[in-house]
Image (cartoon, helix red, strand yellow):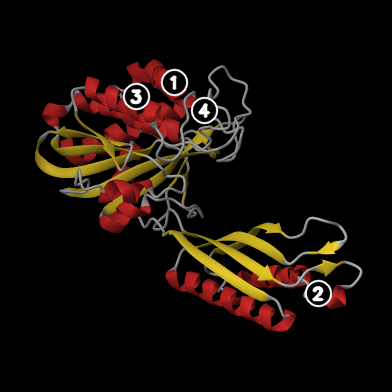
């Protein structure tokens, strides 16, 4: 790793800011402490700062000489998880934790903005630093883009974002050739029967075996209806029916998620789910109601912005590049639907730190903070200075 010379003196401050943000995690759009911290930091740098964009987002604008405008995004919200780590800067908010690295994303972009302010006279263009709420299921990117108080994407030609993953070691990174997230949808199914005493099932319309057949059928969609060259997942993650050991319930509730990359694959899965539900209904006598909800669509990186990111990364790390597209949901897709962009994932783990994202033990190797801040600075140097 080769940290940017202007980032190296800020290593202590990177750690301090990260740990302060880690201790005050907040959810969705309710980010008073986090957004105030971010806005105050940026205002102290002398930047033009816009608060409460998309309810609680923060946007800072660094204007240099005439030239293109780039938007750099970091997300700020945390997750409803009780932290189980034992270090001395764990979450102070019970049941809430930065278990996805958003505190680190915010830290890296804040410190990069500090460095770039010092380069203002050399920048041929404009940088918009975007600090977003509600990435975790709240469509915060869409809310910021649609906020009438600030035309966030005005003049913006390229958009960039960074995420972390402690399954990858510091210095390594994930950057696919195209997709950096997937269609991320959810479904719920209600199987309605007729309950009764367990000793007399012939007087009931039992929704439990119907549900079992339905779940088994859903698991055949990917293996039997999707070409193996395409990746897709149908996961049933919630089943609930009945309360007593001697009573057949009236209904069973089923929930799960669907993930894919290509729109035709997504449509095939949805169609087969509808057909399976209809088939189970006809076979069992139960009524089967499917509710399918579209959440996020894929991030599609542009070839030009990938090239820009790789050029910047080459000056920061010589680690391993992983190209396998991640099967995650990410609302940065709202940005890449509107503008060319690149989203990448930096490794934040080591031999001892390999926790999964969204786990109660998630933590990072703090060396990645310098890597991320250096990447942002190098990116702007490559695009707007050199």
| Residue picked out by circle 1 | 20
Label 4 and label 2: CA atoms lie apart by 57 Å
In front: label 4 or label 2: 2
Mark in the foreground, 4 or 1: 1
Q: CA distance from mark 1 to mark 2?
A: 58 Å
Foreground residue among 197 and 363: 197
Please tell me which residue is depicted at 73% across the width and 60% down the height of the picture.
241
* Residue 333 pos. (x, y %): 36, 54
Nearer the camera: disc 3 or disc 2: 2
The residue sitting at 42% across, 18% down in the picture is 16
Pointer 4 residue = 365
- In this rendering, which labeled residue sits more in front, label 4 or label 3? 3
The numbered disc on residue 37 is 3
Secondary-structure class at tag 4: loop
Q: Are marks 1 and 3 in contact (CB under 8 Å)?
A: yes
Q: Is residue 214 above or below residue 145?
A: below
Per the model, the C-alpha gap separating discs 4 and 1 is 16 Å
Q: Choose the circle earlier in sequence order: 1 or 3.
A: 1
Which class describes the residues within 10 Å of circle 2: few (<14), some (14-19), or many (20+)? Answer: some
């Amino acid at each position: 790793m080769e940290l940017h010379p202007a980032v190296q003196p800020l290593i202590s401050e990177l750690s301090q800011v990260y740990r302060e943000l880690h201790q005050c995690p907040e959810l969705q759009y309710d980010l008073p402490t986090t957004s105030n911290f971010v806005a105050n930091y940026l205002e102290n740098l002398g930047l033009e700062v816009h608060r409460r964009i998309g309810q609680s987002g923060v946007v800072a604008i660094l204007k240099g000489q005439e030239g293109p405008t780039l938007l750099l995004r970091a997300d700020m919200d945390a997750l409803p998880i009780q932290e189980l780590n034992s270090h001395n800067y764990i979450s102070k908010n019970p049941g809430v934790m930065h278990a996805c690295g958003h505190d680190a994303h915010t830290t890296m972009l804040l410190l990069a903005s500090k460095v770039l302010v010092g380069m203002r006279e050399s920048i041929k263009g404009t940088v918009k630093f975007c600090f977003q709420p509600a990435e975790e299921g709240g469509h915060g990117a869409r809310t910021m883009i649609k906020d009438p108080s600030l035309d966030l994407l005005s003049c913006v030609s390229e958009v960039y974002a960074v995420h972390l993953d402690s399954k990858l070691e510091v210095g390594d990174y994930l950057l696919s050739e195209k997709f950096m997230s997937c269609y991320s949808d959810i479904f719920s199914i209600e199987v309605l029967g007729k309950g009764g005493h367990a000793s007399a099932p012939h007087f009931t319309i039992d929704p439990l075996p119907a549900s079992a057949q339905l779940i088994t059928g859903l698991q055949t969609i990917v293996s039997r209806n999707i070409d193996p060259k395409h990746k897709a997942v149908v996961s049933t993650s919630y089943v609930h029916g009945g309360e007593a050991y001697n009573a057949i319930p009236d209904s069973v509730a089923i929930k799960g998620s669907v993930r894919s990359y290509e729109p035709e694959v997504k449509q095939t899965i949805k169609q087969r789910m509808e057909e399976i539900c209809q088939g189970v209904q006809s076979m069992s006598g139960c009524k089967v109601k499917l509710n399918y909800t579209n959440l996020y669509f894929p991030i599609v990186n542009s070839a030009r912005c990938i090239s820009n990111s790789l050029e910047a990364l080459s000056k920061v790390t010589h680690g391993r590049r992983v190209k396998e597209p991640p099967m995650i949901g990410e609302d940065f897709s709202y940005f890449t639907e509107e503008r060319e962009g690149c989203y990448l994932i930096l490794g934040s783990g080591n031999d001892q730190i390999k926790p999964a994202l969204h786990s109660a033990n998630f933590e990072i190797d703090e060396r990645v903070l310098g890597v991320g801040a250096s990447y942002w600075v190098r990116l702007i140097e490559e695009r707007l200075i050199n």
